[in-house]
Amino acid sequence: MYTVQTNISSIIAQENLRVNGEFQARTIQRLTSGYRINSSGDDAAGLAVANKYRSNIAELNQGVRNANDGISILQIIDGGLNNIAKILDRLKTLASESATDTFTGNRTTLNNEFTTLLTEITRQAANIKLNSGGTYNASIAVYIGGGNTQGNSQVTINLSGATNAVDITSLGINASVVDTKANALTALTALGTAVDNLGVAQGAVGTGQNDLQYAVQLAQAQVSAFSAAESRLRDADIAAEAANLTKAQTLQQASLAALAQANAAPQAVLALFR
C-alpha cells in the first residue's frame, strides 16, 4: 500500500533510531562512568542493595579506624604498665635490701628513694589514665560495625574496678615503707601482691589489644566481601559495554540509512502519474 499522508516506514525508522540513540547514550554513560547503574531507572532494586553494601563499607572503614585508635591507646597504657612493673622491681630490690640484718647502710636513704618511687607510680598511673577513677579505669566500648545489633557491633574492653587500676592505693602499697627491717618485710609481702595486681591489669590490656586486632581483621574481610558484592551489582562490564557500543553505532547507522530510504519512498507514488 502506498500513501502520502502517513509514511509508516519513516515512523518505524524514526522510532528505531530513537531507541538505538538511547541505547548508545546509555552504553557511553556506562563506559565513561564505569558503573552499570547510574540512576535508579537503570536497576532500582539493584541500586537499593548496592547502596546498602556501600553504607556497610563506610561504617566498617570507620570502625577499623576506631579499633586502630583503641589499639594505639592500649599500647600507650601497656607501655606505662611495663614501666610501672620496672619500678615495682626496684621497690622490691630496695625492700629486700632493707629486710636483712646484714644491711649496714642508711635505711633512711633507702626509704626516701622508696617513697619517691611510690609517688612516681601514682604519677604514671594518672598519666596513662589507669588510676582509680581515671578515664580508662572503666569499661571501654569500641564501635566497629558489621554486626546484626549495635551491641554485636562493639568490642568491650573491661578495665574497670580497683583490680585494673595501678595507682599505689589500688596496688595495695600506699602504706609501704622500708625504714625498718620489719616494715621492709611487710613491704615485700605487699609488693608481691602489687605485682599480681599489676599482672591482672596487664592481662586485661593485652586481651583488649588482641580482641581489637581480631575485630579489625574481621572488619577488613567484611569490607572486601561487601565491596565485591557491590561491584557485581553496580560496576559495568567494560568488555560487554564496548561490544554494546559497537552494536549501538552499527544499528544507529543502519537506522539513519533506512530512514533516508523511508523518507524517499513517497516519491515513488509520482510514478503512478506518468
Image: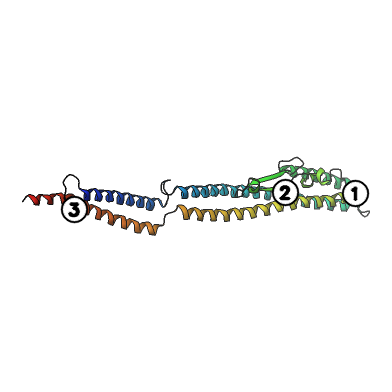
Q: Position of residue 117 (x, y in %)?
A: 80, 46
Residue appearing at x 15%, y 49% in the figure = 266
Instruction: Label 1, secondary structure: give it.
Output: helix
List the residue tagged with mark 1.
186
| Image depth: mark 1 or mark 3 in front | 3
Residue appearing at x 29%, y 48% in the figure = 18
CA gap between label 2 and label 3 equals 88 Å
Instruction: Label 2, secondary structure: give it.
Output: helix
- Residue 261 lies left or right of residue 203; in this view the side is left
Q: Position of residue 147 (x, y in %)?
A: 61, 49
CA gap between label 1 and label 3 equals 111 Å
Amino acid type assigned to the residue bearing label 3 in the image: Gln
List the residue tagged with mark 2.
80
Amino acid type assigned to the residue bearing label 1 in the image: Thr
Packing grade of label 2 (10 A; few <14, some 14-19, many >=20) is many
Packing grade of label 3 (10 A; few <14, some 14-19, many >=20) is some
Of all residues shown, which one is farthest toward the front?
1
Q: Are marks 1 and 3 in contact (CB under 8 Å)?
A: no
List the residue tagged with mark 3.
261
